[in-house]
Amino acid sequence: MIGGKDVFYTGVSVIAEMYWCHKKAMLRAAEKAQMFATWWRFMMSRKEVCPEEVAVATKDRIIFHPHPRVFGESPDELKGKSKWIRLGTEGEAMFCPYREEAEAAFSYKDLRIGAIPDGIGDDWVGEFKVTKLPRYTGAVARCQANLYAFIFQKPWYEVMLYHPITEKYYTRQREVDPDRAIDDLEKFLALIKGEMEPWPCKEWKCKHCDHKKECESVWHGDNPSGWIEYRDWMIELGGPLIYVDSKR
Ligand code: SF4
């Protein structure tokens, strides 16, 4: 479908964005796929990492990132960051006893999905968010956490939301719902393939949307280029996706 090799790289957080706004999820998906194409070529040129071990899982299987990565930032690095970033990083740290192992690439049909949960244990995964809108952000976080649990094959997930004004935490634990995970993946595929019309979004969400300009150009401009054209243009910006034979 994309990159000439029927592969669309994305991330769990991008898929979950559908629960905020379908169009925003699609726009973020195009950006993510473009960034991936750039990153992929960079890794190929360095030949330090075998790309299929990082980003192309065998069908329905998880392959862990073979190289430990440093997640998060040190207290010194965090000093100059906004309150939101600091709160998010500190919150994630509560969930993260095994983060160096918690990166996966997962295949579902044409999707290659990068998954890095905020927290993971023997039988659970967790997602943490800082938000003033727990009701709306909760739906995004639940989708995200359910997908992580599905991908990492954990029986349950936990969502924790932190409200920065009231300083309250909201937590929910749920059993993984594989049917829901598949439904979400199918819906996302249909959206990015242009087989499903994105649902209209609540107007107040558009007010401070950081994708407003792109959204207007794709869907509401005088001469809208259309979603498929925009998607493919973004992918081309990243350059051709060099495919690696996973049997190599
Ligand atoms: S401007 Fe509104 S409809 Fe467009 S991506 Fe943003 S929130 Fe969604």
Image: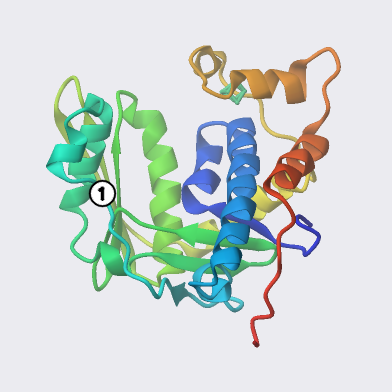
Q: Give the x, y percent position of residue 64.
A: 42, 74
Image quarter (top left, top right, bottom left or bottom right) of the C terminus: bottom right
> Where is residue 75, by image quadrant?
top left
Measured as percent of width and height from the top left, residue 184 is found at 57, 52
> Could you say which quadrant of the image residue 71 lies in?
bottom left
Q: Residue at x 60, y 67 (%)?
A: 44
- Would you name the residue on which mark 1 appears? 72
Ligand 1 placement by image quarter: top right
Question: Which residue is at 39% across, 47% downward?
Answer: 142
Q: Residues within 10 Å of mark 1 (few under 14, many from 20)?
A: some
Q: How is the image coloured?
A: rainbow
Q: Residue furthest bottom?
A: 247
Q: Is residue 182 visible?
A: no
In front here: 186 or 88? Answer: 88
Quadrant housing residue 67: bottom left
Where's residue 186, x and y in %? 66, 55
**Quadrant the N terminus occupies:** bottom right
Task: Give the vertical position of 146 relative to 107 (above or below).
Answer: above
User: Could you say which is closer to the camera, residue 199 or residue 113?
Assistant: 113
Residue pictured at 45% horizontal, 61% vertical: 177
Looking at the picture, does residue 37 appear above or below residue 206?
A: below
Q: Position of residue 228 (x, y in %)?
A: 81, 40
Q: Is residue 118 above or below residue 100?
A: above
Taking 208 as reference, is 163 left or right? left
Disc 1 residue type (three-letter): Gly
* Left or right of residue 195, residue 178 in this image: left
